[in-house]
Amino acid sequence: MAKSWALALHGGAGPLRKRDHAVAETHMAELLREGEKRLARGDKALDVVHALVIALEECGHHIAGRGSSPNAIGQWELDAAIMDGRTRNAGAVASLRGYKSPVTAARLVMEKTPHVLIVGKGAAMIAREHKLEKVHSPKKYYKPAVSRPVKKGELAHGTVGAIALDTDGRLASATSTGGLLGKTPGRVGDTPIIGAGLWADERVAVCCTGQGEYFLRTNAAADVSSRVRYGKQGLREAAEGSLDDLTLLGGDGGMICMDVLGRVEVVFNAETMKRGVVTSSGRFDVATMR
Ligand code: ASP
């Protein structure tokens, strides 16, 4: 019997915006097909989530990479992270300026340094040392996917994420974000924080999206794993439990979750969440609305 694999992507959760989601959904479907091909032929989950998050960063449909908005002083500061489930090796960058692929900088932190999280100038230094592609003129390169909150006073935000299980039974997750629109310089959300915005171990992989402050306060991604591991909860119950915890605090957002058998759960309390799933058992779906 062929070994199972699975892949889930998301492009952020948030309030309802009256816009056509067809282009972003078509692109996400293409990425799922690409991921399917790679996982079916035996590529590593870590490489697949990395490659697909690069594509999500480049596409400009989401608030990450090219689609990010500037902070309160007109600068682009981006966050990203990546984690390998079997080894729990992880890497992350925060407040990175001047490079096209924050998730690639995060992978460099994981593989080329003894550290897990590097911020600001240090993150840019790693990117420069490894000759990552630069953004020479930010105002021309970035095409903010959203430039204004839907409702006045609201904190608009977005992220992209990918989780995968490969045929070797390894789980991995990767995230990348422009964070909150108009954020205070130096503000870091959950996305690059291992355990809050993403998690991968030998049982479970999770990526979160939503207002990061709530995910930080509940350690949301690792909480899903803890519920499975110590609480003996099923994946759905664990995902819902973690989301409930931050809903009680007033947080909004959602998460994509996967277990080592390739089961995928998507939970969110926001009005929309851009997401897509493909599995070796024949599941294929892409959606934005509930
Ligand atoms: N979690 C991200 C942040 O707070 C934003 C999002 O996922 O929408 O930076």
Image (spheres, grey):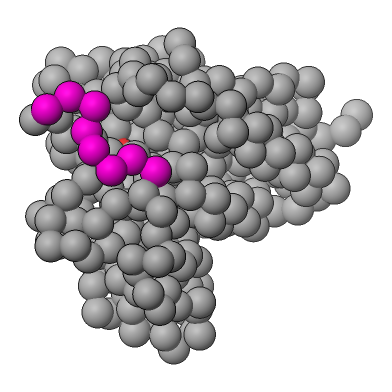
Which of the pair 241/191 is nearer the observer? 191
Q: Quadrant of ligand 1?
A: top left
Q: Main secondary structure of the magenta part?
A: loop
- Side of 288 relative to 140 (left or right): right
Residue 225 in picture, x, y percent from top left = 40, 32
Say if residue 48 shows up in the picture: yes
The structure residue drawn at horizontal position 30% and vertical position 71%, both measured from the top left corner, is 97
Which of the pair 155/267 is nearer the observer? 155
Q: Residue furthest bottom?
A: 129
Residue 287 in picture, x, y percent from top left = 55, 20
Total number of numbered discs in the rendering:
0
Q: Residue furthest right?
A: 1
Q: Is residue 19 magenta?
A: no
Image quadrant containing the N terminus: top right
Image quadrant containing the C terminus: top left
Which of the pair 290/72 is nearer the observer? 72
Looking at the rendering, the stretch of residues picked out in magenta corresponds to: 145-152
The structure residue drawn at horizontal position 58% and vertical position 26%, both measured from the top left corner, is 22
Q: Residue furthest front?
A: 140
Residue 186 in picture, x, y percent from top left = 14, 62
Quadrant of the rendered structure where residue 77 is?
A: bottom left
The structure residue drawn at horizontal position 27% and vertical position 80%, both measured from the top left corner, is 122
